[in-house]
């Protein structure tokens, strides 16, 4: 399809469902850690929807949704309640879902995103609590070829937050960035793993288009079945172009639910869109209303860590670039290691931050990428790495030798000082010791000498490299260069 017509504006709102990392389910004592378990083994009469059973609210889940609301700048309702949302899908054991309708726990928040250098706030309408459904596993009979479905109830009843944005998003790129930043916040505060590929961070998108300058919204379409950030982006781009094409042809957009097909790279109609009255909401009679005291909210607020955006600003104030700050603050464990490394170094804070950032984004990142590991698997404690960094920064060893020592440290666990002393890797800076090596390099490379006298500056770098190779990287490159230029000018 062609590019999105510039005379149209895209309006997007996102609904994100996120599973919480609680030990038990939302309304019963079954373990919520069902990943990899045999089907239908984490179940009880409550999450199976048996007659006569009574749900009990998971207090940890309520703490976590309040923490999420605070992290997203929401107001926390002192009074809220649970409701029954009635619909009859095969994966809903009771025939209704315990959710929240008109009195959610969190409302009126925002999350800041940045796309192409422009920062915008996306409003958060509400964050409410509900229970997850069972999983349908679709199969095809190998003999008859007939499709059939199996139900795994392990997921049913798992605590599920729904985070609903305002229709403030104006592009697919902005939608993707919103999801990335939202997932980052949820991981930072520790309430969810928020992995789309594992199904504990799921997104539905509402999208409409209108001519630029119009104030009324167009007819919205809901898109489901998107299991990656890329799928969300591609589905929104396709759907925007589809709707514009319909309007340009004189047609009318139908309010409906469409599914994204990765295989076809297209949205496909699934059903007409339900309205709130279709669900026949009414207050859940088996659960009391929630009254959250100011003391409870403040106790939860005390758990709130420094969030990614604030970390980035603090790192920038220390002199780090936007890229360095964002990369180091991207994940909370990485930021924690960086800050421990800064604290273990000497000197003023800006110097320590720059040294730590250089090694974190250099050698440490190289090791993590090569080993396909996260920072929690990195074998060196911050203090041990700081010992090596100080050796290089002080000139006790060269940068080249520092990289060699780094590799030996992560392989053996030995300290930088012990490796340097045992292998005699201290930097050679004495002019008397280096002068002979310099003269040797000049005598062995007459072409480089001729190139130097012909005005080729790279010849000096070549000769420096010869001396560095001879000393296994231990020579002080600056002293070598001074000696070379002195000898070559004779």
Image (cartoon, rainbow, N blue to C red):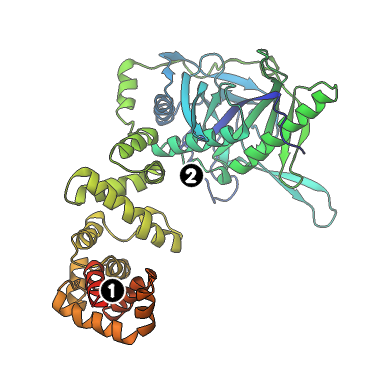
| Of callouts 2 and 1, the N-terminal one | 2
Q: Where is residue 348 in the image (x, y as percent from the top left)?
A: 18, 45
For the point 56% across and 21% down, the residue is: 166
Q: Residue at x 54, y 51 (%)?
A: 36
- Across and down, in percent, residue 266 comes to 75, 40
Q: In this view, does 313 lie above or below 76?
A: below
Residue name at image x 62 percent, y 34 percent: 172
Check the image and report above or below for 375 versus 303.
below
Label 2 to label 1: alpha-carbon separation: 52 Å
Where does label 1 land, which residue?
473
- Which quadrant holds the N terminus? top right
Q: Can residue 123 be seen in this view?
A: yes
Q: Which residue lies furthest to the bottom in this view?
A: 444
Q: Quadrant of residue 413?
A: bottom left
**Secondary structure beneath label 2:** loop
The residue under label 2 is 33
Q: How crowded is mark 2: few (under 14 residues within 10 Å), some or many (20 or more)?
A: some
Q: In the image, is 431 to the left or to the right of 96?
A: left
Disc 1, SS: loop
Q: Do the residues labelled 2 and 1 touch (CB within 8 Å)?
A: no
In front: label 2 or label 1: 1
Work out whether 79 lies above or below 111.
above
> Of residues 138 and 205, which is closer to you in this image?
205
Labels in figure, total: 2
Q: Please give the name of the residue rendered at 37% of the width and 73% of the height, measured from the top-left corner.
A: 459
């Amino acid at each position: 399809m062609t590019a999105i017509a510039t005379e149209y504006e895209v309006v997007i709102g996102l609904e994100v469902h996120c599973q919480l990392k609680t030990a038990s389910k939302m309304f019963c004592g079954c373990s919520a850690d069902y990943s990899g378990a045999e089907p239908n083994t984490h179940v009880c009469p409550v999450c199976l929807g048996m007659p006569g059973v009574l749900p009990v609210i998971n207090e940890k889940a309520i703490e976590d949704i309040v923490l999420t609301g605070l992290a997203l700048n929401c107001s926390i309702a002192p009074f809220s309640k649970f409701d029954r949302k009635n619909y009859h899908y095969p994966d809903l054991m009771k025939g209704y879902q315990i959710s929240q309708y008109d009195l959610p726990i969190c409302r009126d928040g925002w999350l800041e995103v940045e796309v192409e250098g422009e920062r915008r706030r996306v409003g958060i309408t509400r964050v409410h609590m509900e229970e997850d459904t069972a999983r349908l596993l679709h199969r095809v009979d190998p003999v008859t070829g007939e499709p059939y479905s199996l139900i795994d109830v392990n997921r049913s009843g798992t605590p599920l937050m729904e985070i609903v944005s305002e229709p403030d998003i104006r592009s697919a790129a902005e939608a993707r960035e919103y999801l990335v930043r939202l997932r980052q916040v949820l991981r930072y505060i520790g309430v969810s793993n928020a992995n789309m590929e594992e199904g504990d961070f799921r997104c539905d998108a509402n999208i409409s288009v209108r001519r630029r300058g119009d104030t009324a919204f167009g007819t919205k379409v809901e898109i489901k079945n998107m299991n990656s950030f890329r799928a969300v982006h591609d589905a929104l781009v396709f759907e925007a172009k589809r709707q514009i094409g319909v309007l340009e042809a004189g047609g009318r957009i139908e309010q409906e639910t469409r599914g994204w097909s990765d295989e076809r790279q297209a949205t496909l109609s699934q059903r007409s869109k339900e309205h709130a009255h279709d669900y026949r909401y009414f207050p859940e009679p088996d659960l009391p209303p929630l009254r959250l005291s100011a003391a409870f909210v403040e106790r939860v607020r005390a758990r709130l860590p420094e969030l990614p955006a604030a970390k980035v600003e603090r790192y920038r104030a220390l002199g780090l670039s936007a890229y360095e700050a964002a990369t180091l603050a991207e994940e909370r464990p990485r930021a924690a290691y960086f800050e421990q490394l800064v604290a273990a170094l000497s000197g003023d804070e800006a110097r320590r931050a720059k040294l730590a950032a250089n090694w974190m984004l250099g050698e440490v990142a190289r090791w993590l990428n090569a080993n396909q590991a996260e920072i929690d698997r990195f074998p060196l404690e911050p203090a041990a790495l700081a010992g090596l960094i100080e050796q290089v920064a002080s000139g006790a060893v060269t940068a080249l030798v520092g990289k060699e020592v780094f590799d030996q440290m992560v392989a053996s666990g030995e300290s930088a000082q012990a490796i340097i002393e045992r292998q005699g890797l201290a930097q050679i800076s004495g002019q008397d010791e280096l002068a002979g090596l310099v003269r040797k390099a000049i005598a062995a490379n007459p072409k480089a000498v001729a190139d130097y006298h012909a005005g080729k500056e790279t010849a000096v770098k070549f000769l420096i490299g010869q001396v560095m190779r001879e000393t296994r990287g231990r020579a002080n490159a600056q002293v070598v260069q001074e000696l070379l230029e002195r000898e070559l000018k004779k």
